[in-house]
Amino acid sequence: MTKASANKVTQTSSYDVAEHLRTPKEMAAYLDAWLIEAPEDAAGIARALGDIARAKGMSQVAKDAGLSRESLYRALSQEGNPSFATVLKVAKALGVQLHAQAAPSGG
């Protein structure tokens, strides 16, 4: 390693998935992936809803869901634990639907 390469600093930037959720189809696919890959991770699914809400605009989603922006941020945060009623309101405000299907047997 040369002295010049030893002094180079790697620049990183934080990744925000909300910046990449542009269409309703992408938003629904993202939430669906969470529901399929981590169905027992309630906090992760809530965060996914939060990512989609940020992509759509948190203020508008809060208004459409009948919640304050602050309570929506809190409910969908890392530490949040939204009620199922809140999850349903947010899903409706986001324009996504939750679906059920039979789980694979023998698992």
Image (cartoon, rainbow, N blue to C red):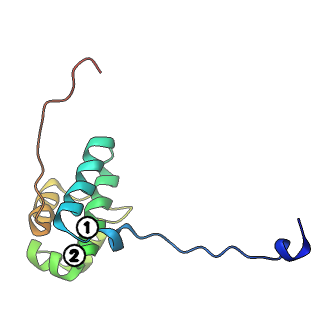
> SS at mark 1?
helix
- Residue toward you, 68 or 59: 59
Distance Cα–Cα, label 1 vs label 2: 6 Å
Residue 100 coordinates in the image, percent (x, y): 11, 40
Q: Position of residue 63 (x, y in %)?
A: 12, 79
Please name the residue shown 51% across and 72% down the image: 14
Where does residue 7 sit, x and y in percent of width and height? 83, 76
Quadrant assignment for the C terminus: top left
Considering the image in quadrants, where does the N terminus appear?
bottom right
Quadrant in which residue 6 is drawn: bottom right
Q: Which mark is residue 52?
A: 1
Of the residues shown, which amino acid type is indicated by label 1? Ile
For the point 23% across and 59% down, the residue is 82
Verify CB contact (< 8 Å) between mark 1 and mark 2. Answer: yes
Residue 23 vs residue 18: left or right? left
Which residue is label 2 attached to?
56
Q: Few, some or many C-alpha atoms within 10 Å of disc 1 (few <14, some 14-19, many ≥20)? A: many
